[in-house]
Amino acid sequence: MNPILRYLKNVFAAKRVLDENLELMGLVKADSLLQDMYAKNKFPGLAITVLKEGETVFQKGFGYADIEQKQFIDPRKSIFRIASVSKPIAATALAHMVQDGIIDLDESFYTYFSDYPKKEWDFNIRQLASHTAGIRVYKGKEYGLNEPFSIKEGLGVFKNDPLVFEPDTEYLYNSFDWVMISAAMQEASGIPFEKYVQEKVLKPLGMQNTFCAKCHLERHRKIDGTKLKESTEFKASENVVNFYTKCLTGFRKAIPVNNFYKLAGGGYLSTSADIAKFGQAYLNKGIEVKAQILNQFLTSREVHGKPTYYGLGWQVSEDAKGRKFYGHIGNGVGGYSNFFVYPKEQLVFSILINCTNPIIQPELDAVIDCFFN
């Protein structure tokens, strides 16, 4: 029996309560859908946090953080790779730099990073942030690199390739755009990207369980003096989940990767509770950046008069039922994530999975739909 329904004394009581409370009915349905997905081996482990008007209305873990050890998911403590949900975090840091006059969105990238190889066309920070600069996507095994590149060194993966198109003539989503932005942010501020994000975004918002693998490793070295490898094999904290890939027989451990160089585009780790907290800060106007600046980040850009449904580091769109949201979907080696903020409905969704794309987005959409009366 569904765990929530166990609290109801009998079938008749359940029917009476559910008929009178659509919100509870939505919770039961969402729980049932997720239980069913886990029972059908759709994912190894999943954490979900849902906030409504600032209150936690649903928070639960399903499955395992570690399959072999039978370690259960805790949505408040289990730490996942959030993949491209890193982009809104990086975008928030960029918004701070814009407000402080450190970076101008419409200034050429070369103003901040002059030794980057010259291309056929110039391009600016706004174009990079909106994926309209013409930077290429991953090739071959680049998606799963396991090299200890710094952000600046990471530019070497693609910097010698030509632009795919003239800036502002097309839209091409990729993570390399944000490697470039983070490099420019470092050069402009003189502060390592990860430290700037920590001080301007994570610390002020109380996101204590959000960090990059490298930062976490350094923190634990200071605590216990041990040397830890910078790869997916590290287990610096018992709260970091194992990362998996779906296979014919179930799930196997994902290949080792090092995502530090693309931290801004997909390298952060976090909990579902922390990511929900981040979304709620936007609804509460808790981001200390002027609205006129944030609105630029949360407004879809247009190409040839048509919306791209992407702002600056944020997906800005509407769901199948026409409800407007901003947020991001993330997919990386060993991690899949959903992060959506619905301003009109005052809803925040944070769903994290410890598996490379499990191909269950329609099912997750159905779970999210349960929370709208």
Image (cartoon, helix red, strand yellow):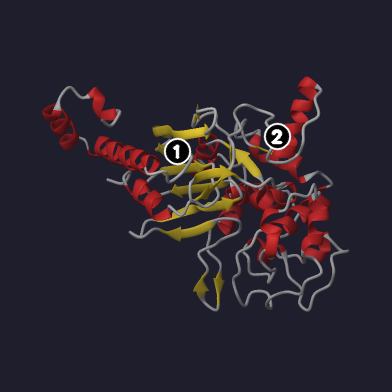
Label drawn at residue 323: none
Q: Which residue is mark 1?
A: 48
Pick the front one: 48 or 197: 48
Q: Residues within 10 Å of mark 1 (few under 14, many from 20)?
A: many
The x, y position of residue 339, in whole percent, is 50, 47
Q: Residue at x 37, y 47 (%)?
A: 368
Q: Which residue is mark 2?
A: 234
Q: Is residue 218 above or below residue 258?
A: above
The three-letter amino acid code for the residue at tag 2 is Phe
The three-letter amino acid code for the residue at tag 1 is Ile
Q: Residue at x 37, y 56 (%)?
A: 323
Q: Is residue 318 above or below residue 8?
A: below
Q: Residue at x 53, y 60 (%)?
A: 299
Residue that sits furthest to the front in the current view: 249
Q: Is residue 9 left or right of residue 359?
A: left
Pick the front one: 133 or 32: 32
Q: Is residue 205 above or below residue 359?
A: above
Res 102 seen here: no
Q: CA distance from mark 2 to mark 1?
A: 24 Å
Residue that sits furthest to the right in the current view: 115
Pick the front one: 126 or 79: 79
Please state, as top left, top right, bottom left or bottom right, where the N terminus lies in the image: top left
Earlier-in-chain disc, 2 versus 1:
1
For marks 2 and 1, give the one nearer the viewer: 2
Q: Is residue 98 left or right of residue 159?
A: left
